[in-house]
Image (cartoon, grey):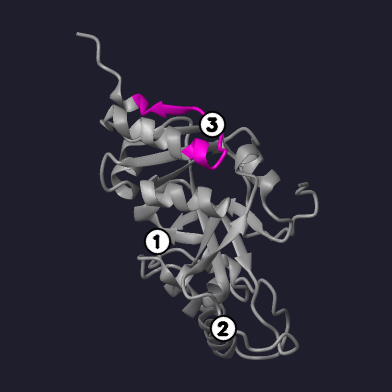
Amino acid sequence: MSAGNRPRHRAFVPPSDPDTKIWRYMDFTGFVDMLRHAGLFFCRVDRFDDPFEGSIPRRWLEESRIEDDSLGNTGISHSELVAISREELLKQRPWVLVNCWHMNEGESAAMWKLYAESNRAICVQSTYGKLDGVLDNGLFIGKVNYISYGDDDIPIGNLFWPIMHKRKSFEHERELRAVSCDVPSATTGNNAPPEYGEWRSVDLGALVDVVYVAPSAPRWFAELVENVSKKYDFQKPVKHSSLDAEPLR
C-alpha cells in the first residue's frame, strides 16, 4: 500500500529517516489480539490515562501568544475564538483514535517496565518507513511534541495540535503517533464513536521485523510466543530481550 497520498498537517512531523526504529511494547494478550485481528489497535485519545491528553496549555488564554492555525480573520474576539476551539476540541476528541510507538535505536528498560507488567510480555520492532507503508493513506503520522502546559503554547484553531502535544514528564517515551480522525459531519449522521477504539487491518508481515520477549522471560514463554505466531502464520523471529545479556566480569 502506498502512503504517497497521506494527508499532511504541520502538527505531524515525521522522522527524517524512514529507517528510524520503532517499538511497541505489550503484554502477551495484546500480542495475541494483534495476531487475531491481523492489525493494530487505535485507542480513543480520551481513554488514555494521562488527564492532559488532548488538553490545551494556559497560554491559549493569552492573546499575544496565540497563532490562529485555521480560523483566519473571522472578526470574532480572542476570547470567543478560544471558547469555540475548546468546545470543538471536547466534542471531537472521542473520534480521534491513536496508535502509539516508541522511537529508539535499541530496547528501552523504562518502556519494558511501563508497558509490560511482568516478564510474560513482548515487544515488536519495526521502522517508521514500514509503518508508513502499511497504514491507510487517510491516517496521519508524526512525532509527539513535549511541552510545559503552564509555560509553553501551541497553535489554536485545530484539533491536531493538542493531540500531538504531551507533558514534558513523558519525554522519555519518544512517541510516534498514527492518528485517525473521522469526526462525523452533519451529512454523515450522528453515529456514536467506538467505545474504546478500533482495530485497523495491516500487513503485519510487512510491518514487523522482530518479536522480543521481555527481560528474564522463561524459555517456555519464548516457545509459546513462537507457537502462537505459527498458528496465525506470522513468520517472524522471536528473540530474548538484549537486556538479558550477561555483563563481563
Circles 1, 2 touching at the beta carbon (< 8 Å)? no
Residue 162 lies within the magenta run: no
Spot the residue most to the front. Answer: 231
Q: Mark number for residue 96?
A: none
Which quadrant of the view contains residue 187? bottom right
- Looking at this view, is 173 or 196 the one in front? 196
Magenta residues span 229-242
Q: Nearer the viewer, mark 1 or mark 3?
A: 3
Q: Can you name the residue that lies furthest to the left here?
A: 249
Whether residue 3 sits left or right of residue 15 in the image: it is: right
Residue sitting at x 64%, y 35%: 17
Say what amino acid the circle numbered 1 marks.
Answer: Ser
Q: Is residue 153 visible?
A: yes
Horizontally, is 138 left or right of 28 in the view? right
Q: Amino acid at mark 2?
A: Ala
Marks 2 and 3, Cα distance to the nearest angstrom? 37 Å
| Marking on residue 192 | 2
Q: Amino acid at mark 3?
A: Lys
SS for dot 2: loop
Residue drawn at x 40%, y 49% as measured from the top left:
171
Lower sequence index among marks 1 and 3? 1
User: Label 3 belongs to which residue?
Assistant: 236
Question: How many C-alpha atoms fall within 10 Å of the one at disc 3: few (<14), some, or many (≥20)?
Answer: some
Q: Which mark is residue 148?
A: 1
In the structure shown, which secondary structural element does the residue marked by tag 3 occupy?
loop
Which mark's residue is nearer the viewer, 1 or 2?
2
* Secondary structure category for the residue under label 1: loop
Q: Is residue 50 above or below residue 211?
A: below
Q: Is residue 18 left or right of residue 50?
A: right
Position of residue 134 relative to residue 213, above or below, is below
